[in-house]
Amino acid sequence: MGKLIKVLSSSPLTRPKVAVTLSALGLSGVAFVGLCAPNSATLPVLLPLTALARQLGAPNLSTIVTCLVMYPAILLCCLGLAGMLWANSKGWNPSPLRVFWVAVAAIAVCVTITPVGSSDTASYAAYGRIAALGYDPYVFTPYSLPGGGHNPYTILVGTTWQQTPSVYGPVATWTQLFAAWIGGDRPWATIWVILICTAIAFVLAGYVLLRTAANPVRASLLWVANPLLIEQLVLGGQLDSYIALAGVVAILISRRGSTAWHDAAAGISVGIAGGIKVTAVFVGLGIAVPLLRDRAWSRLARTGAVAGATTTALYVFSYGLHALLLAFRDSTQVISPSVWWLVRGICDHLYPAHTAGISTVFGFLWPPLTLALAWYFYNRLSPDVPAAAAATCALTLAWAIVTPWSLPWYTSVAWVALALLPRNTLTRWLTLATGTLAIMHFNGGHPVNTPPGSTS
């Protein structure tokens, strides 16, 4: 791999025009799949630009053709990103504002296209509809909506998830409720609002990086103009964009000052991120690393207490403790395809009577393995880099690699933290990890469209 990277880093790929062209081609390939919805990588719903494409004669894509488009498109996104970063390291220094606004223009187009690569937006819309009707989405399932499997919202949800209550935090539920309030009995409109809100969070995180990063061009290329992240977070409509926004705000606040107000504000930001997904705990752990190193026990206690109290209050006072317990549902589940899935298959074959116990063991194994790998990544960085951002990046990347239930958008916080760091070797590993997961997992969540992977 090192030899391949060395060859690529001195190839025409590092020319700005070549890199930008590859990025555009990769993103266009994914968008083309969305414009040809429904297919095996999309939901069976037509957003405005997709509906227009249908009227103009967009083709129906078979599962094989969809894969033949998606695989090279994702690869082109990765190569284009790598090329742009190499070009920047060799002196290419475009206007960061120009990069930002070009990316915003591309994102504005993407939000009008049917979501690609995940069925999550259908689940988000269904949970929002449940909340809008006055039910508890942490008890009530999409299949329980009026009409059951014939409800227009339920139909869009992958059959695997139709009887699954929400595992997302109350802040996430509020965004879904807002979208469903606007969409009403029109699922496509609810999903469109979800995509728009997700894109706004993504762009806001990019603007924060633009204003605060030491190298705004590199930060913009790593986040808002990153074709791989636009494909995953914007075209996929993932909640992780919100976590990244809250996470980068928390990291920057913790770096800006050491007063009680700074610690409380950082804790509130981490707590809000935890109110979206509990995986935001890695942001809190990352902020804690420099405080532990400096033995700033009072700051650590203040930040941790405020973060924990904020997240707990959001869950308990919104929907109850059962909502918080559901958030840990995936901790012992194994996704396919993955190394853990292969190991579990072997164990199930050798010890069929201990299947449940094997999953429990996996649940205990991945946290220490995550910390060990994060420590390795962290020590590969220069000691003078911002510790909170470095630790957050290392922890999130390690978790995405090690956890038995991993998806490409889980690396979002690692990317936003990486944008605050100078050039380092974690960039290549993060690109490889996200790209590999993206190639392994993209589908619309319906068994009639044979998927190449799984979604959550």
Image (cartoon, rainbow, N blue to C red):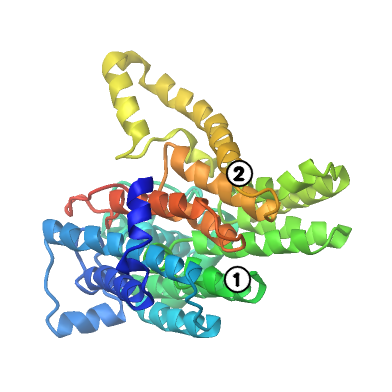
Q: Is residue 369 left or right of residue 21?
A: right
**Corner quadrant of residue 370:** top right
Image position, residue 369 (x, y; %): 53, 31
Q: Residue at x 51, y 27 (%)?
A: 365
Mark 2 lies on residue: 378
Q: Residue at x 58, y 44 (%)?
A: 380
Secondary structure at numbered mark 2: helix
Confirm whether residue 161 shows in the render.
no
Secondary structure at numbered mark 1: loop
Tell me the kind of residue under disc 2: Tyr
**Corner quadrant of residue 47:** bottom left
Q: Is residue 159 left or right of residue 291?
A: left
Q: Residue at x 85, y 62 (%)?
A: 261
Q: Of label 1 and label 2, which has the lower sequence position?
A: 1
Mark 1 lies on residue: 215
Image position, residue 171 (x, y; %): 59, 61
Confirm whether residue 154 shows in the render.
yes
Tell me the kind of residue under disc 1: Asn
Image position, residue 198 (x, y; %): 48, 69
Q: CA distance from mark 1 to mark 2?
A: 21 Å
Closer to us: 209 or 19 = 19
Closer to us: 214 or 314 = 214
Q: Residue at x 24, y 65 (%)?
A: 44
Q: Is residue 251 left or right of residue 41?
A: right
Q: Is residue 452 left or right of residue 304?
A: left
